[in-house]
Image (cartoon, rainbow, N blue to C red):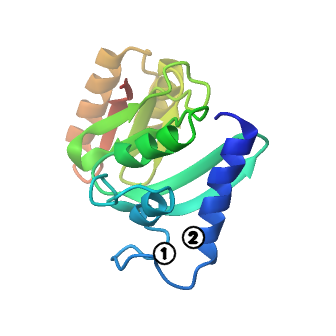
Amino acid sequence: MGDLNEVKAIYKVLKSLDKRKTSIIENDFGKMWLGNLVTKLGGDWEKYRCRGAIIDYSLDDEVLTINQYVAWCEQEGVRNIIEEKFPSVKVYFIEEESGCGVFSTNDTSGLFFPEKYWVETDCESNYFETMEEVANCISEIVNREISPTMKDLEEAVSQYMDDNEDCYIAIHEISFV
């Protein structure tokens, strides 16, 4: 989010990477590797965490969305260089890394990422904005109504998983960083 000219300039850089036949720098992620973006923006990819790749991007009105597949956590170096090179731009992100227990966003206003909870099951995962939505989801799974408190939801999930050993359910609260 920022000045439209700066947002469009970032989009143009992304398109130039996407149109390439090969990567700027040899890597295991391909031409959309985050290190290539850092390099195109004038940064040194060895000084920024670039462990990941852009899987898609879009420009709608004044909002540029960049979806990334990254290892372990948000690659803040990429966000930092974008914000350094384009001072009017603010990069908002949401990250999930269930293996490390990381679920966070820097969007404290909820403008772009209003979700506050992530429910993970062995079949699917979904984001929810309210505890009531989480309670509805869990109530459907366990076939009984659960009140919208974390304590009651965790108890219902624990009991359900004890009774259904092959099932997995986890409720994660998204923190603000």
Taking depth in this image into account, of 55 and 140 the one nearest to the observer is 55
Q: Secondary structure at mark 1?
A: loop
The x and y percentages for residue 7 are 67, 44
Residue that label 2 marks = 17
Is residue 57 depicted above or below 156 in this figure?
A: below
Q: Secondary structure at mark 2?
A: helix
Q: Quadrant of the N terminus?
A: top right
- Residue sitting at x 50%, y 56%: 41
> Is residue 121 at all visible to an observer of this figure?
yes
- Residue 27 picture quarter: bottom left
Q: Amino acid at mark 2?
A: Leu
Q: Amino acid at mark 1?
A: Lys
Taking depth in this image into account, of 65 and 47 the one nearest to the observer is 47
Q: Are marks 1 and 2 in contact (CB under 8 Å)?
A: yes
- Residue sitting at x 23%, y 49%: 99
The x and y percentages for residue 74 are 36, 45
Taking depth in this image into account, of 169 and 34 the one nearest to the observer is 34
Q: Residue furthest right?
A: 61
Is residue 7 depicted above or below 1 in this figure?
A: below
In the displayed structure image, the side of residue 122 where residue 90 appears, left or right = right
The x and y percentages for residue 122 are 36, 53
Residue that label 1 marks = 31
In the displayed structure image, the side of residue 142 where residue 99 appears, left or right = left
- Residue sitting at x 41%, y 38%: 119
